[in-house]
């Protein structure tokens, strides 16, 4: 049986690997729209532009917010 700590460690390693693969940063920010004393957050992903040696853009800068809820695909 895998423990909670082992599952968390595996997830974090895979998440970091995915961020590294895409040169992405993940940032969680409060959105200022909490309700009933709860806080609400937005998770933002940003990926810098990629330029080649000839200074041509190969991939545009992108920034987007993750959906507020995601489940495993079946």
Image (cartoon, grey):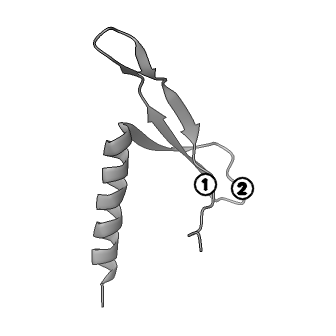
- The dot on residue 39 is 1
Q: Is residue 28 toward the left or the right of residue 22 in the image?
A: right
- The dot on residue 26 is none
Residue 34 image position (x, y, % from top left): 67, 51
What residue would you read off at disc 2? Answer: 35
Q: Secondary structure at mark 1?
A: loop
Where is 55 relative to 44, above or below? above
> Is 30 in front, or is 9?
9
Where is 63 relative to 11, above or below? above
Query: What's the residue at 52%, 30% (across, down)?
Result: 62
Residue 12 image position (x, y, % from top left): 33, 61
Where is 70 relative to 7, above or below? above
Query: What's the residue at 30%, 85% (across, down)?
Result: 2
Q: Report the quarter where the N terminus lies.
A: bottom left
- Based on the displayed image, in which of its 4 quarters is residue 37 positioned? bottom right
- Based on the displayed image, in which of its 4 quarters is residue 48 positioned? top left
Instruction: Name the outermost residue toward the bottom.
Output: 1
Instruction: Name the outermost residue toward the right.
Output: 36
Q: Report the quarter where the C terminus lies.
A: bottom right
Q: Is residue 20 toward the left or the right of residue 57 in the image?
A: left
Query: What's the residue at 34%, 70% (across, down)?
Result: 8
Crowd tier of the residue under label 1, counting other residues whose Cα lies within 10 Å: few below 14, some 14–19, many 20 or above: few
Query: What's the residue at 32%, 8% (across, down)?
Result: 54
Q: Secondary structure at mark 2?
A: loop
Q: How many marks?
A: 2
Residue 24 image position (x, y, % from top left): 39, 38
């Amino acid at each position: 049986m895998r423990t909670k700590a082992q599952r968390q460690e595996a997830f974090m390693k895979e998440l970091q690997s995915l961020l590294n693969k895409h040169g992405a940063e993940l940032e969680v920010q409060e959105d200022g729209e909490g309700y009933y004393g709860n806080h609400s957050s937005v998770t933002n992903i940003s990926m810098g532009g990629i330029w080649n040696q000839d200074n041509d853009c190969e991939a545009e800068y992108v920034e987007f917010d993750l959906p507020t809820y995601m489940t495993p695909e079946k």
